Image (cartoon, rainbow, N blue to C red):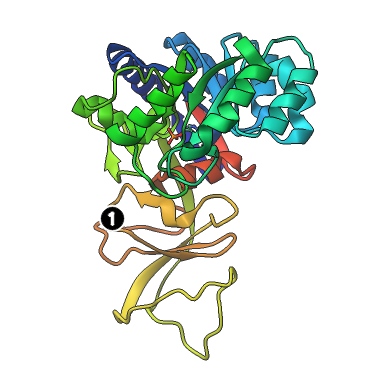
Amino acid sequence: MFPELKVNIPNICANAAYLKKECREAGVEITVVTKVVCGNPILVHALKKAGIESFGDSRLKNLQRLQQNDIDTPLYLVRIPMPSELAQVPDTVDVLLISEIGSVETLLQVTGKKETKLIFMVDMGDLREGVWFEQIDHSLSKVQKLAKNRLVGVGTNLGCFGGILPEEENLSLLKHIAHRYSLSIISGGNTAALKLIEDGTLPKGINHFRLGESVFLGNDVTRNRKIPALSQDTFVLEAEIVELQEKPSVPRGSRGQDAFGRVPEFINRGWRKKAILAIGEQDVMPSGLLPLDEAIEVLHASSDHTILDITESKSDYRVGDIVQFHLSYGALLRSMTSEYVFKKIVV
Ligand SMILES: *Cc1c(COP(=O)(O)O)cnc(C)c1O
């Protein structure tokens, strides 16, 4: 049944095992962040078997499902918590990333199966979560007084909102903050921080990374690169051609906006061979579709239709044929989330 997402477990596990080894040699332990695969328990069991010792997710619901599926490794909640979910956190979460003193106070009042430890988030410049680094001492001294030994570290997230790169400079500053408060865990980043290990510029003392994209896609979108030594052949999305006709390259008539309020650009290249795939915004982020047949161009999509220009392809496509794609991070996230995409796990 289509659209179908093929998940290559051996290649994903090989990525994880490689990253664990490379990071450990640099003094960094890794937590695999599973939000892009919606915390899929089959994948997590396979990763655990491949040697991964802790998992993180942005959604409490995903962590709860992992717990119900007997994943007994430490579980990290990597999105700062909603106040409304704090009461449930200690039943599932071993380590919580947090940035609001009020949330720390609430958490300390609730009890559960676990004594959730805290990593306090510092904004080193990317403008997502965390107390701004120049004002961190005020907050951190308070949190340490409140949480005592349950405060185990500091963390930062870079490269996600502002696209700010993790570098020797900003990570050194984070390390100094941790040392001022004698905190043992310094969670220095995500996939974008791997380059510092490759280059040998990671400040000594940064000892924890939270990795998602590198494990599941072998890419680093912040630095716009494939990571050497990792496999990018981890997910293949297959969709079916439902129409194949020659049409002009520019629409005809007075133009408004498309179904999503966008005004796409069209270049006049004459009549072209176009294929419509039965897949759309509801299944995938079409701009993140990377055709395995590199002569195919993805033009545009609406909720349920994606239009391809196949004029340059050497293959003789027919209606009913399947077209295969690798996926960007955003496209994978949406495909895993969509109940209309059938998941086929290849072991
Ligand atoms: C998603 C996320 C990660 C993983 O990031 P990747 O770039 O996929 O490696 C790490 N930390 C936090 C806080 C996240 O939200």
Amino acid carrying label 1: it is Ser
Residue 67 is drawn in which quadrant? top right
Residue at 44% of width from left, 43% of height from top?
Answer: 329
* Neighbours of disc 1 within 10 Å: few (<14), some (14-19), many (20+): few
Q: Above or below — where is 260 with respect to 232?
A: below
Residue at 57% of width from left, 12% of height from top?
Answer: 74
- Picture coordinates of residue 241, whole percent (x, y): 47, 57
Quadrant location of the C terminus?
top left
In this rendered view, identify the residue nearer to me: 214 or 69. 214
Left or right position of 263 against 101: left
In this rendered view, identify the residue nearer to me: 292 or 219. 219
Residue at 77% of width from left, 23% of height from top?
Answer: 88
Left or right position of 205 against 261: left
Residue at 23% of width from left, 31% of height from top?
Answer: 228
- Mark 1 secondary-structure assignment: loop
Q: Above or below — where is 34 with respect to 247?
A: above
Is the shortest distance between ligand 1 and the CB of mark 1 under 8 Å? no
- Picture coordinates of residue 307, whole percent (x, y): 45, 65
- Picture coordinates of residue 138, whole percent (x, y): 57, 32
Q: Above or below — where is 135 with respect to 278?
A: above
Q: Is residue 40 visible?
A: no
User: Which residue in the protein does label 1 denote?
Assistant: 315
In this rendered view, identify the residue nearer to me: 48 or 202. 202
Q: Is residue 166 visible?
A: yes
In this rendered view, identify the residue nearer to me: 88 or 312. 88
Quadrant location of the N terminus?
top right
- Picture coordinates of residue 113, whole percent (x, y): 75, 9
